[in-house]
Image: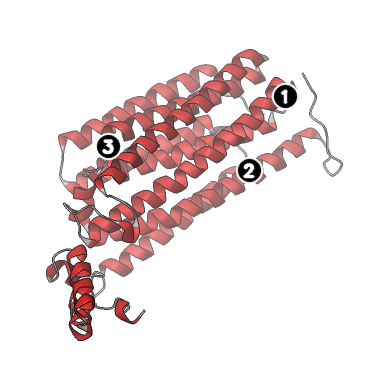
Amino acid sequence: MARARLEEHFEDLDKQEHAARLGMWVFLASEFLLFAGLFALYATYRALYPEDFARAAEHNNLLLGTANTVILISSSFCVAWAGHSFVHGRARSAQAMLAITIGCGLLFLVFKLIEYGQHIHEGILPGSYYRFHEFDTPGARLFFTMYYLMTGLHALHVIAGMALLSWAGAMLLRERLDPEHPTLLENAGLYWHLVDAIWIYLWPLLYLLR
Amino acid sequence: MAQVSGRNYVVTWIGLLVLTALSFSSSVLGPSPVMETVIALGIATIKASWVALVFMHLWRARFADRLAIVAAVCMLMLLVSLMLTDVLLRHTMPPKPLAAAQASAGTLLAADEAVAQAVARGDEAGGRAVVAESAPGLPDRLSQ
């Protein structure tokens, strides 16, 4: 196993890792605020069009949405377990769990694309491209525009998370990570947990409150 | 780095799945809309907190790490509370954007078609009338 390299401007590895951890948390807070704007917008429009929003949510695929929730929660467990394994010297197990996590992310995206396909087939598109004649009110249009914005931005974050996890996986395979200071793996895991936490909120708002 | 025991991860995972099932079944049972919102968001908050505390190691993290996310959450609560109090206590007429459109022109698509037909007939004044009636406050599309 590699030893983490102490950068010149840090006194010791612990302080270096503290700085990396805090930097990651501040970044996560900024990502949270990015979604906070959309959540606030959703809350406001929902307060203005409660019946339309509830009725529109029935056109979302509850089965796929719930499956995606279970997938992301399990993938969060997998990446947490990967970090746990690696710190306890089980690098092979860590690699396997990381691969499963990335696979779960891919499955999530596949289900999401299927859902988008179903919506587009019905004519449900964001903004002024909306063509769903059976249910066409301003409230419905707003719901689905918010749906596309929020899940679309979330899907981009899933892709970014998978890229980070792949990077950590590559470093893991090349034995470039230090079990006592697995900063890259830990931080990639933190990003993935945030993606999961955001979906934990998106799921009831867009699928359950019908 | 503070360690979380492997068992804690498994317990958290199972707990999250149980809460998901609870949330799902409570939505299927269909309580009143207010109760449903409270239950759904309440369970979601418990799940997200559990992910943060155990999976993201916030339970044993330093104060600085916790402060970052707590500050962001406070910002969200401030944002949502101020936006909602603004919007829900308005006395503008109409209180919602495009409320008149729902009442008069039926669907927005119908209004669009009515405008298109008016333009095809060369009836600009008629088209403007449909726009003004169906969507007060929208920019005049005929003049674009």
Q: In this rendered view, identify the residue nearer to me: A134 or A32.
A: A134
Residue occupying the point 69% across, 28% down: A182
Q: In the picture, which quadrant includes the N terminus of chain B? A: top right
Which residue has dot 3 on it?
A: A61
Q: Residue A150: where, in percent of width, then height?
A: 40, 49
Q: Report the colour scheme.
A: secondary structure
Count the labels in the image.
3
Number of residues whose C-alpha sits closer than 10 Å to that of mark 2, classed few (under 14), some (14–19) or many (20 or more): many
Q: CA distance from mark 3 to mark 2?
A: 34 Å
State the SS at label 2. helix
Left/right placement of residue A3 relative to residue B109 reads right
Mark number for residue A24? 2
Q: CA distance from mark 2 to mark 1?
A: 18 Å
The answer to whether the residues at label 3 and label 2 have Cβ atoms under 8 Å apart is: no
Subunit of label 1: A
The answer to whether the residues at label 2 and label 1 have Cβ atoms under 8 Å apart is: no
Which image quadrant is residue B49 in?
top left
Q: CA distance from mark 1 to mark 3?
A: 44 Å
Three-letter code for the amino acid on which mark 3 is drawn: Asn
Number of residues whose C-alpha sits closer than 10 Å to that of mark 1, classed few (under 14), some (14–19) or many (20 or more): some
Residue occupying the point 60% across, 14% down: A93
Q: Earlier in the sequence, mark 1 or mark 3?
A: 3
Which image quadrant is residue B139 in?
bottom left
Q: In the picture, which quadrant includes the C terminus of chain B? A: bottom left
Residue occupying the point 42% across, 32% down: A110
Q: In this rendered view, identify the residue nearer to me: A88 or B108.
A: B108
Mark number for residue A180? 1
